[in-house]
Image (cartoon, rainbow, N blue to C red):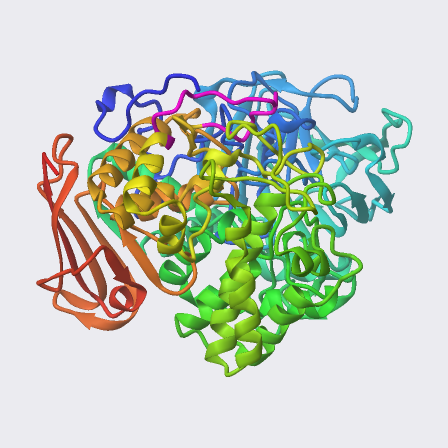
Amino acid sequence: MKKLLPLGFAALAALQLIAIPSDACCAAGNAKWVRPEIGTAYNGHTFVAATYPFGLLQPGPDTGREGWQYCSGYRWDDARITGFSQTHLNGTGCPDLGDLRIMPFAGEAKPDVSSAYRKETQVAEPGYYAVTLDDCGVKLEATVSPRCAIYRLSYPKGEGRLLVDCQHGIGWDLATSIVSCDARAEGDRRIVGTTRRRGWVDRLYSYVIEFDRPFTACETLPKAADGEKAPRFALRFDLSDGTPLHVRIGYSTVDVDGARRNLAKEIPHFGFNDIRVAARAAWNHYLARADIDGTDEQKVSFYTALYHAFIQPNNIADVDGRYRGADGKVSVAESGEYYSTLSLWDTYRAANPLYTLIVPEKIDAMVATMVAHQRAAGFLPIWTLMGKDNQCMIGSHAVPVIVDAYLKGFRGFDPEAAYQAIRATLRERHADRVKENWDLLDAHGYYPNDIVKSESVARLLECAYDDWCAGVMAARLGHAEDAAFFQKRAGNWRNVLDPETGFMRGRDSKGAWRTPFSPFALGHDASRRNDFTEGNSWQWTWHVMQDPEGLIAALGGRDKALAKLLALFEQPEKTADSGFVLDATGLIGQYAHGNEPSHHVVYFFQFLGRGDRTAELVREIFDKFYLAKPDGLCGNDDCGQMSAWHVFSAMGFYPFNPCGGEYVLGAPQIARVKLKVENGKCREGNGEFHVIARNLSKENKYVKSVTLNGKPVEGFKLRHSDIVAGGELVFEMAARP
């Protein structure tokens, strides 16, 4: 792990991204603190495109399009921009999207036009992006509505040239990724089309691209590589009047008519500034849910984290509620919302619980989406992109998201229908499901690693957690037989805990433990023979969020469990038996903050009576791994999960078990947070929950005491119901434990 500079209380002079926007339309609200550049270098895989909260499009720059380093299409370190596409992924570990590239240019029209640019001309803000392209002298600006994008292109006076590239994408095998495309000019002001692309998923999207003046020429360029099926258009515009060229883009997962309706509803004219102001207002609306007191640096880090969490999931339904679902068929969402970019293996841990707290009005539609997906596909979503499931990860983590919503009292969905979707997912065989075999699991009580060649232990641990969640909901709804079945299967984690080594360890169908065994050996995915997913046994041994006390007992009691947990953070920062270390980043010993299976582990110390160690580690993670710089994230943001950890931990509590409505207390990193909550009253106002860290400083990082509404908190847990009822949580901080 490369050396990173401290964040928590570092000097403001060390920051690169702190300047406050001077533009009048951007001067107010918490959006002014957001720096999209954070995470665009090293392994963060974030981007600087314009976004709308939970919106469909992200118009902005690409600097590369193929390979793991270009999962979002943009890297801060690159000196040239290759184009501006309309869809991007935030912080993922796999590249995709990059639909509909446009690129101003001068000189010869060719597929690979690009331009140098200077960072000082680049402006990235919530809902807005701008840059000057040195090679053609064009200032490009982009902003966005929930389903559409608009550009303002200021050319040097005279003729303007623009490339519209329907072949472009981000991913692998890009020349042959497009199955079909019917893009075509419609008159002299519009390009329309529908494209089917195979990448991470097999998907279809339609679009309408409109210009505020006619193009004077439209040249279709020759194909750049064998197998290409989509055109590239080189357009000319008469700009002799010196006014900018405006381009507006409607997008739909359904059809061209849907794209037209989206555009007509959301960007009915070419008034760029109106759309920019509306996007900014939308961001301020959501970012105002939390007001914090702190340094400028702390505000930048906190609000950028909240921003990254709210880029997705994305509502892919058209303005009339139509969407293209998991079965490829067009359906209608009654609420007008159907969410995709569900990176559930990552986000069920903290991002989805954060949504229940900060944007509760979105939860019912998210759950309805998951239930509708199950009706179409036969099982709940695993990892969805534009409505289709790539199934790239393990577990069935729509289950804890649904059960968590149910246990927290959300009732904008039918609980019984939701439960039946859970039951069908976890008990029925599905021919199209990639990583499941319930018969094998039930026969052995674990996944034998001579049959399941990779990820066998990690799969079991994730399934056990999902089963625990399902059992809780089954019991609440009166399905006693199901509850007993799921609770028994939830205890299967014990079958892979080797009592001799004290580590989670793979075993074969005859019961023999994997030999040789190294707790440092990394596994990644189904393509590599090992028992873990994106980690090793040091990291995965603690993956029993549903039963920490049971794990403590199984490890030999509190003293032995504590010694092992302390040792986790004291190990050499190394890996063994694998050259694949992309996801094992942000190391403190063998703790890997750069990847999700570790995210709850620093809070495990609370169960062992060592809250002081939690406080120390939370501070260390903030100081090392959340920096207000382009390389400030130690791992992929993973659709907001890395950012959600920051938001919760900054406030002083975390959803150790992300299903059920309990938080484990930690150590706050900011002096005061005011949350706007959904209901209830508190002493200082209606619908507010205050978190106060008294005497917090660089030295005072330990928690001396905690009170809730003036009464001492017994133990180390906080209930979701306490927060949404409103009130005041006060931490007294001290220099010593």
Q: Residue furthest bottom?
A: 478
Visible residue check, residue 656: no
Picture quarter containing residue 221?
A: top right
Depth check: 403 or 563 in front?
563
- Which residue is painted at 68% across and 28% down in the image? 65
Visible residue check, residue 587: yes
Q: Which secondary structure is most common in the magenta stretch? A: loop
Where residue 414 sits in the image (x, y, percent)?
A: 55, 79
Where residue 622 sits in the image (x, y, percent)?
A: 30, 33
Please state the extent of the stretch shown in magenta in the rendering: 568-585
Classify residue 479 as left or right of residue 404.
right
Quadrant showing the N terminus: top left
- Which residue is painted at 72% across and 21% down in the image? 113
- Which residue is painted at 80% across and 47% down in the image? 195
Where residue 98 sits in the image (x, y, percent)?
A: 67, 37
Q: How many marks?
A: 0
Depth check: 223 or 161 in front?
223
Classify residue 308 as left or right of residue 297.
right
Classify residue 464 as left or right of residue 600.
right
Picture quarter containing residue 430?
A: bottom right
